[in-house]
Image (cartoon, rainbow, N blue to C red):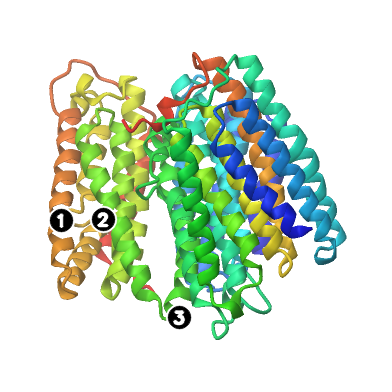
Amino acid sequence: MGGILLFAFPALAIVLCLVLSSRRKIDLLVLLHALIHSGLGTWAYIERGSLMGMDDLGLLIFLILSVLYAAIAFYRLGHKDNSTIKNYRIHSIFLMIFVMAMDGAALAKDLGLIWVFVEATTISSALLISYSNRKSSLEAAWKYLFICSVGIALAFAGILLLVIAQPQHATLLISKIDLSTISPFWLKISFVFILIGFGTKMGLAPLHFWLPDAHSEAPAPISALLSGALLNIALVPILRVDKLMHASGMGDLVQELYLLMGMLSVFIAAVFILRTKDYKRLLAYSSIENMGLIMIAFGCGGMAYYAGFLHILGHSLIKAAFFLTAGNALQIYKDKNYENIGGLLKINRGSGWLWLISSAMIIGLPPSPLFTSKFLIATTMLGKGYYLYFGLLMLLLAVISWGIFNVGLKICLGDSERKQSLNPWLYLAPAGLLFIAAVIGIFLPVMN
Amino acid sequence: MLEILIVLFGLSLLWASVTNMLGTIIKILVVQGLILFGITLLKTTQLNWLSFVTIALETLIFKAILIPWFINDTIKHNQIHREVEASVSNFFSLALMSLIFILSFALAGAAPAWSVKIFPLEFGIAFATILKGIFIIIANKKLITHLMGYLIMENGIFLLSLSAGSDLPYIVSLGVSLDIMLSVLIAVLFIKRIRSTFDDADSPETLRED
């Protein structure tokens, strides 16, 4: 029943959207979809396994998506843009398709199906990124579609190799794969392809080029979903195959690969956070950094494994709030270069404070859940004797924190005579996300 | 017969390594599409009729006719310079292709015999095609050449899926259905629109970091 509602409602809403002629009605329809999504998320959390047999990993990703989708549906009520009703309708339809595709990827257990849904997220979100139809947004969408298509094609090659790895009764249903007969040789090669392929979609270095452009060119609510939800979706198939690797006794190789890609991603982020003048690109590089940290957490294992999931949760909520706040700043200044702007606290106190709190929470100051996750990653690294990685990571995190806070202070401080108020939803949506993140940071959730 | 077709497919990769002309790469795509169609015909017994019809249509109509025609049309309409403008010489490209072949066959040969469902020649050529596609994407500057590299890579994956598909037929259909959707999207939505927005269809910007 829940599964039918999850996919049938947006399908009906898409048809209805085609005949609606007012933005308000379209916004309310999207909000209704988001509320149903949240309701199903709550039900799935209370009655474990009730929603299409969802497992814990699927549930975590689904819940994050529910919260984020609800927040952006409320945010849209106050968000203004100059597009025509026709474009807005198409945008809203593809938003619902995008969410449906992400739901499918979170719920599916068959690697082939997950791949199809991840592919569908690429196609639907490419249209959302190019929404403004500017030269830069078209270029960003092209880059995103092309690089992610290459990644997805490589992931498909990895899936084919997984089929080849099974000498008899091949299946892509992870729980049904017979580990006693699987070929470790082909499984290893398959995993490398799957990691690079879906890692591209996650924005992991060295195939991260698409991410800063796509996240900075998309409208604020889409950037929030791309960064907070889509990157997690790309991690799902990697973690599902990761289980096979660990069960086949190749966990060490997996952890080394995670550490390597993670450290490289944090390094790339640190370099470009210092160079960029565009505050939305800065947030995008911060997403690359956090995806890198998540991989480092899974690469360290032990307590850091829990930290990895906590980091996924915390980063999604805080980064989505940050992107929504950046959307407020863009609405106020109409400029993405932070060197040309300032005095946000004077012009719009609410957005100014949201920016400062988001900055503090994304770099991991308490009560951010990222404080605990980073602390656990650091202690696990020391406990396992990864001293070189630890030293390098701390240095890079210090550089990134300085970069983010420095930009935050430049934007928020300074004098201005101008005052501008915004629709209350534009504060409430990011504030709600930050509040949930703080609650999670204080009452740390138990995860299986 | 199957072996001959696969060897011909491998030779088309060497051909792609020594050409500088976009028109020749289009011809190579046509040849690869036809060879894949031939391989599909030879694998009729391993596929159910629905998969067979879908794959036959995709390889013959889509890979061998529609996509090459579309790329040719785009080159004409956009007045794109007909040379590839690769950042490496033909000699280097050919030497690297040879290395790719060696690596792919070494990998095929290193596999424990009991686990291999496809024979090494098939795997080696398919794997080399995937790597060649990636190399074309990396080594070239033009957006249209990136797309051609992507299509060659997809042909390699398709060859691999035909081999793996004997065990899990639906996987071939998965690849086929999304290949079509994706290629159409890339082709129609983006190249045409980017053409009207950018000064030319070169894409040095797509490799820019910041």
Q: Chain of mark 2?
A: A
Residue A7 or residue A303, whichever sits in front? A303
Q: Are marks 2 and 1 in contact (CB under 8 Å)?
A: yes
Where residue A392 is drawn, which disc sits there?
1
Q: Residue B169 in the image: x percent, y percent?
A: 74, 64
The residue lying at 82 percent from left, 58 percent from top is: B42
SS of the residue under disc 2: helix
Farthest residue to the right: give it. B49
Residue A340 or residue A113, whichever sits in front? A113
Q: Is residue A110 visible?
A: yes
The residue lying at 25 percent from left, 27 percent from top is: A348
Q: Residue A322 in the image: x percent, y percent?
A: 32, 41
| Residue annotated with mark 3 | A247
Left or right: where does residue A257 sit relative to residue A86?
A: left
Q: Residue A118 in the image: x percent, y percent?
A: 56, 52
| Residue annotated with mark 2 | A263
Given the image, on which type of amino acid does mark 1 rest? Leu
Quarter location, residue A426: top left
